Amino acid sequence: MKKNVFMIAVLMLAATLVSCGKGAASKQSVTLIQNKPEIDAALQAYSAQWTEKSGIPTTIKSVGGSSSITLGQQLRADFAAGDMPDIFIIAGIEDYKEWKDTILDLTNEKWAKDTSVAFKVDGKVVGFPVAVEGWGMAYNGDMLKKAGIDPATLNNYDAYKAAFEKLDTMKAELGINSVVSMAASSEMGWVTAHHNFNSLLSNGLPYGDMSVVNDLLAGKVDMTRLQEYADWVELLFKYADKAVLTTGNYDAQVGAFATGKAAFLHQGNWTDPNMKAANATFEMGYAPHGSMKKATDGIFVSAPAFYVINSKSKNIEAAKKYLEDMVYTPEGQDFMVNKAGMIPAFKNVSLKPGGALSKSVQEWAAKGKVYSWMQYNFSGDFRDKTLAPIYNQFANGAIDKAKFVELMKGSLEGAK
């Protein structure tokens, strides 16, 4: 999913209609709601450009990041008010189940043939992949070189423990406040209970392997795997800046790494625009998560979310055109890759992102060293309301590791 300061930014873009063609277009409009505030400015600009060219007014709403309001909550409020958008985001199967009665079949759309990561249900394409994203542990390569640490060796718990311990003794020399920039505040539960939680679910498993997920959904908890995972969470929390960990928002967490105040960052390649804005020029890339004793040589890569079209909308044709133009026009491709800094999910797009973290994701993916995103097989309420507070308590010192394991086990035995 996945993140600047909270915003619900709305931009109404109305073009002056000077032709019959544009006059006809003006009968429709497009309202889109999405959950990536870090691309809001780029999306607003692209939509203004699209409106100017198509004559179709657009309204863009961006929800998420450090906000306490989730996309699901906003959609439910819109639904209750009879004001559902024409295009909205789903993250996975649980979101699909909630909104399936208002999601249009997009199987016959042109772009569906140009991507391998569309969201499908029962053989039907229903979701347009926003991008391809990935995360591992982002590292500052310059700092690791100074410390004599080879990032290629960081692929298990013991390797990370040794590296963190060494870096911690060099904080003054390196000019850092913490080894890791990690966030576990109440408003950053998506970092812990979504992304970090996924380490428990898929790390070290073949891509698409749902064995751990299926066991957990059946109430079966592998205690060895959970204990090792708890060690990893404890390690990240121990070597994080406590202020950023317990009260920091997205900007604080990402900013600490971007400005050279932390050697590692627990975030994905969607932070490339933040790195650019901070003029971060140091070497950076991704290493695997260390949530297991055994080596796990890969990072987590997938389409993070999918645009779906509201099947009850009066603006279906305009919504379809908006998505198609994003894939097949120079302006749309420029938005996705150059302006938003995303890895395109469509094979016809030849542009490559310039961000170092996105390049690292592409390199891992090209080698086939990737693990699945499995967190969305659990409901948003389970992740946000059940799991996130457990991580938050652990980060704040309200519970110890043994209690963390106990609470996670109890929650996962009743997972849904």
Image (cartoon, helix red, strand yellow):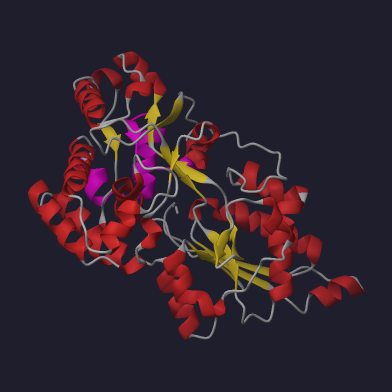
- Residue 61 as seen in the image, left or right of residue 5: right
Residue furthest to the right: 20
Quarter location, residue 347: top right
Place of residue 88 in the rendered image (x, y in percent of width and height, measured from the top left): 55, 68
- Residue 191 as seen in the image, left or right of residue 26: left
Residue segment shown in magenta: 242-269
Asked if residue 244 is among those painted magenta in the image, a careful observer would answer yes
Asked if residue 290 is among those painted magenta in the image, a careful observer would answer no
- Residue 84 as seen in the image, left or right of residue 295: right
Place of residue 289 in the rendered image (x, y in percent of width and height, measured from the top left): 33, 36
At x 49% / y 48%, what residue is drawn?
A: 302
At x 71% / y 53%, what residue is drawn?
A: 327
Quarter location, residue 298: top left
- Residue 396 as seen in the image, left or right of residue 332: left
The mark total stands at: 0
At x 26% / y 66%, what residue is drawn?
A: 385
Does residue 84 appear in this view? no
Q: Quadrant of the C terminus?
A: bottom left
At x 22% / y 63%, what residue is drawn?
A: 219
Place of residue 380 in the rendered image (x, y in percent of width and height, measured from the top left): 36, 66
Place of residue 109 in the rendered image (x, y in percent of width and height, measured from the top left): 72, 64
Does residue 238 appear in this view? yes
Q: Is residue 401 above or below residue 150?
A: below
Q: Quadrant of the N terminus?
A: bottom left
